[in-house]
Image (spheres, rainbow, N blue to C red):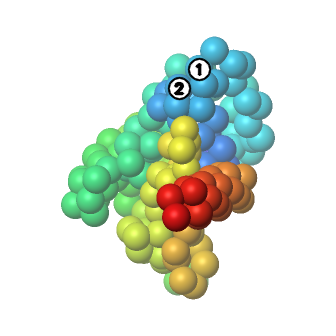
């Protein structure tokens, strides 16, 4: 983090780190997964090697909950409004250097919030709103970002996808067995 007068240069958070933060510290993902009484996971250092062990847990939880609400919003307009709220709170603005390289600066607020908001904004610009969301798996509301070209991801992990496939297979088997009994 570099101070430029009244503004602070923002380190954009890596998306895998952001997902770990939201899924590991978000109140809703922890509650739905039955992890609300479990210890919080250890996060690797944040942007600019920020030592997250020095950040109060309540701040990490609040940030995770606010980011989760962007992913969980019911439509693109609501997502945009929630992300704009975070961007405004951080006072996030683009800057460009003499070589044409873009960067972000924050005029107020928490640099970690600004780095997370910038990461979501860049992901939306690159991939679109349709590629981020909440896991479609049963008993899971973890967030995901589908960076693939098709952008058809609906699950946070292969574990949730496999559970859904097994559930669907067993359901088809039960339906097939029931048809055999009915004949």
Q: According to the image, label 1 marks what residue? A: 36
Please give the name of the residue rendered at 50% of the width and 58% of the height, measured from the top-left corner.
182
Image spot of residue 69 (x, y percent): 38, 43
Q: Which mark is residue 95?
A: none
Across and down, in percent, residue 149 comes to 57, 84
Q: Is residue 44 left or right of residue 132?
A: right
| Nearer-the-camera pick, 161 or 30 | 161
Q: What residue is disc 2 on? A: 31
Looking at the picture, tell me which residue is in the foreground, 102 or 131: 131
Q: Earlier in the sequence, mark 1 or mark 2?
A: 2
User: Residue 64: x percent and y percent?
Assistant: 51, 36
Q: Looking at the image, can residue 23 be seen? A: yes
Q: Is residue 155 left or right of residue 68?
A: right
Please count the marks in the image. 2
Q: Quadrant of residue 155?
A: bottom right
| Residue 30 or residue 5, whichever sits in front | 30
Q: Secondary structure at mark 1?
A: loop
Q: Which residue is rendered at x = 52% and y = 31% of the image?
A: 32
Q: Is residue 6 left or right of residue 54?
A: left
Rate crowding at label 1 as few (under 14), some (14 to 19) or many (20 or more) other CA atoms within 10 Å: some
User: Residue at left 73%, top 36%?
Assistant: 43
Residue 148 at x, y = what percent?
60, 78
Q: Alpha carbon of mark 1 to alpha carbon of mark 2: how far?
A: 5 Å
Neighbour tally class for label 2: few under 14, some 14-19, many 20 plus, Cα within 10 Å: some
Residue at horizontal 77 percent and vertical 41 percent from the top: 44
Apparent side of residue 174 relative to residue 122 in the rendered image (left or right): right
């Amino acid at each position: 983090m570099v101070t430029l007068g009244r503004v602070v240069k923002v380190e954009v958070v890596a998306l895998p780190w952001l997902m770990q933060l939201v899924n590991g510290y978000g109140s809703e993902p922890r509650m739905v997964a039955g992890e609300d009484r479990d210890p919080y996971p250890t996060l690797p250092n944040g942007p600019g090697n920020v030592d997250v062990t020095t950040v109060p847990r309540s701040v990490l939880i609040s940030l995770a909950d606010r980011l989760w609400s962007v992913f969980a919003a019911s439509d693109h307009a609501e997502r945009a409004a929630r992300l704009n709220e975070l961007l405004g709170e951080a006072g996030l603005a683009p800057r460009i250097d003499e070589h044409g390289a873009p960067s972000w600066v924050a005029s107020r607020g928490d640099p970690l919030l600004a780095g997370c908001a910038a990461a979501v904004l860049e992901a939306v610009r690159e991939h679109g709103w349709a590629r981020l969301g909440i896991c479609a798996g049963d008993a899971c509301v973890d967030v995901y970002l589908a960076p693939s070209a098709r952008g058809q991801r609906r699950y946070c992990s292969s574990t949730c996808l496999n559970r859904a496939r097994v559930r669907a297979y067993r359901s088809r088997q039960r339906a097939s067995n029931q048809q055999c009994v009915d004949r």
